[in-house]
Amino acid sequence: MLNTDSLDSVCAALAQTAGIEPPEYAAVPCRELTGFARESFAGKNADRVFMYNPDAIAGWISGKYPAFIEEVTSRAGLSLPLRSVMPSVTPVCFATMYTGAQPETHGIRSYTKPVLKTDTIFDALIRAGRRPAIVSTAGDSISMIFLEREMDYFIYETEEEVNAKACELIVADRHDFIVVYNGNFDTQMHRTGPESKEALAELRANARTFGMFDELIKANWGSHNSLVGFAMDHGAHAIDGGCGSHGLDMEEDLNITHFYCAHPERVSS
């Protein structure tokens, strides 16, 4: 069975949580996410949002191997089942996540990486006077489809460099909305299958990376209401030859589970 709530509902929920107007074509906000944030922050807005975007971690994977993502689930106050979009490939799905629009509206409908002209959450943040940043590996969808905006981009060759810069940005505490992309699980599962020991090691690495970010946020963003997301784009399935793939209209590729932490302000700014 496919999950009920669509990935397109995340964008407006993030905008509402941050207290800004959503992008022009964003679908209605996800009630579970907005309700979680409202309760966590006692009705106030989140003035910091950190979205960690690991690629291709399917809902069936996170459900079947809970020990590998315990660093995420032990911290998260909200587990949010979502249905991704077709085709379930990276640029299409991340375009939907951050425009709130379906592919036929935002315009990316295949594995291509054009710069989006559709209104995004980054545009909405800039209009509201906020400071967003993207931290990603060169050539990947996140580093390409959201370019040409008056915001900060930190693009590197390796995940290690990406994650080190993300840590620097957390400690510096100058950005209101940070998106960090890691494609290591996706890369490995294509080579050896989503349940291979090598792919599961990358899943564990993603979870530990999230835990590191979350600890830094708790230590450095005490004067903020901070929402932290572990938010993948699509799932994956095994194919012949011991490899993995995605892109099909099937539960394995479309069902995902986002995880969110909320850290209320502790220290007056």
Image: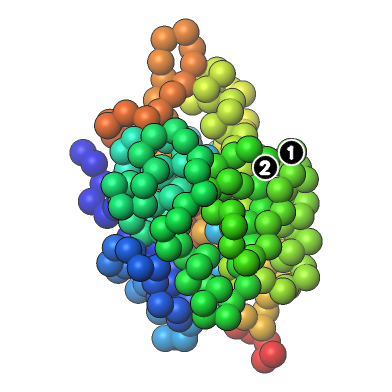
Give residue 6's position: percent from left, percent from top. 29, 52
Quadrant in which the N terminus is drawn: top left
Q: Residues within 10 Å of mark 2 (few under 14, many from 20)?
A: many
Q: Amino acid at mark 2?
A: Thr
For residue 66, the mark is none
The image shows a total of numbered marks equal to: 2
Give residue 28's position: percent from left, percent from top. 28, 67
Q: Amino acid at mark 1?
A: Thr
Earlier sequence position, callout 1 versus callout 2: 2
Looking at this view, name the residue that lies furthest to the top.
241
Q: Is residue 199 above or below residue 124?
A: above
* Residue occupying the point 52% across, 73% down: 125
* Residue occupying the point 62% across, 31% down: 201
Q: Is residue 232 above or below residue 215?
A: above
Residue 201 falls left or right of residue 108: right
Residue that mark 1 sits on? 158
Residue 165 seen: yes
Tag 1 near tag 2, CB within 8 Å = yes
Q: Quadrant of residue 236?
A: top left
Q: Secondary structure at mark 1?
A: loop
* Residue occupying the point 37% across, 30% down: 247
Quadrant in which the C terminus is drawn: bottom right
Residue that mark 2 sits on? 137
Give residue 250's position: percent from left, percent from top. 27, 31
